[in-house]
Image (tube, helix red, strand yellow):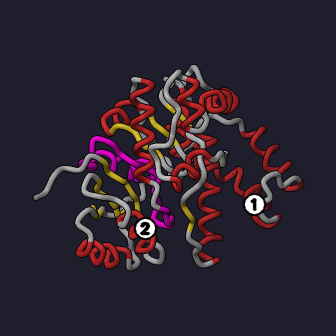
Amino acid sequence: MYKEPTYSICIPNYNMGDTIERALVSVLEQVDDRYEVLVLDDGSTDNSVEVLDKLRAKYQSLRVIKLKRDKKRKLGETRNISVREAKGKFVILHVDADDVWEPFINDFVTLFHKLEKCLNKDFLLSGQQLNIAKKEYLLNYGPYRNTHRAQDRDMWLRLAAIDAYIPLDHKIFRTRLSRPKKVSFYKAIRDSWYHMLYDMRRGTALKSYILGCLTGLFYNKTKNFSFKFRVLRFAMVLPVFIASRFDEPLPPPDNMKSHAEFAEYRERTRGTYQEIMARHGCDSDISFLSEEAQKIFETKEVVA
């Protein structure tokens, strides 16, 4: 007998046929009938659809929606469609088609409800690459804006401006699957372009951006990018600025205009489950979780 799910795990997919089966199985094998795993295929041209159809025949909790490709629709709007189409009261986000997850998603959901009861308000709980909120609340107060990259950071900032964003520190329990070097390289270039485009649409001054990219040529702060890639990024600044003039602006909230203000809010509100509960005067005991889960959620592994 079918029953409506309480939780919808929303996963966008576009041409991730080389990783999507391993990613989905890692999620599908750890959820029960309270969950649906909703994959929104954004017009894939590889073997993704065939993989999804095969998995759907095996897992009842998997639901697939196939969209026609629309170049005007960026990842932010694709995520919005997945939230609107979700059948669950709660949506779980940023589970991607190239991530393999250890079996602690349900523990993350349990902690969300404990925090929800403690704080007695609606909010988005943002863990390490995992987020959860009420579907209707997210649609009313935090829908993604139509940008390809930084759509999550943009929504976090707007929710932080209304004190509805809580960062949860814990040990990462997902692994990003490797992809062919050529695919990864072009993805890095594309992602960099869209990150820069988002910054320009937010109103970042061209002069300061050029200066930052120029400085980055000689000072590789994160050590994540080669010199060749940093030169390419510097070369993209002016074309990105021109492209940004043809897109609608994405202004930040009036009460949280700068990244520094968001960073201050994030540091002030973040913490492990125990730290956040204690901060709000609630029971911070975590022994209701398994020993394995306690190790995940007692550990502070912060990713910026």
Q: Is residue 171 above or below residue 207?
A: below
Question: What residue is shown at x 38% (from left), y 74% (from top)?
Answer: 48
Residue extending furthest toward the right: 218
Q: Which residues are magenta?
A: 73-102
Residue 24: in sight, yes or no? yes
> Badge 2 is on which residue?
26
For label 2, the SS is: helix
Among the two numbered marks 2 and 1 on one chain, the one whose residue lies closer to the N terminus: 2
Residue 249: in sight, yes or no? no
Residue extending furthest toward the left: 1
Q: Position of residue 52 (x, y in %)?
A: 32, 73
Closest to the observer, 298 or 181: 298
Q: Position of residue 197 (x, y in %)?
A: 60, 48
| Classed neighbour count for the residue bearing mark 2: other residues with Cα under 10 Å, few (<14), some (14–19), many (≥20) | some
Q: Is residue 204 left or right of residue 223?
A: left
Q: Is residue 5 left or right of residue 50?
A: left
Closest to the observer, 179 or 232: 179
Question: What residue is shown at x 39% (from left), y 70% (from top)?
Answer: 25
Circles 2 and 1 in contact, beta carbons < 8 Å: no
Residue type at mark 1: give it: Asn
Q: Quadrant of residue 275?
A: top right
Rendered-image quadrant of the C terminus: top right
Residue type at mark 2: give it: Ser
> Badge 1 is on which residue?
224
| Classed neighbour count for the residue bearing mark 1: other residues with Cα under 10 Å, few (<14), some (14–19), many (≥20) | few
Q: Position of residue 232 (x, y in %)?
A: 75, 62
Q: Is residue 204 above or below residue 106?
A: above
Task: Tell me, yes or no, whether the highlighted magenta stretch contains residue 2.
Answer: no
Closest to the camera, between mark 2 and mark 1, is 2
Task: Tell me, yes or no, whether the highlighted magenta stretch contains residue 92.
Answer: yes
State the separation of the CA atoms marked 2 and 1.
28 Å
Rendered-image quadrant of the N terminus: bottom left
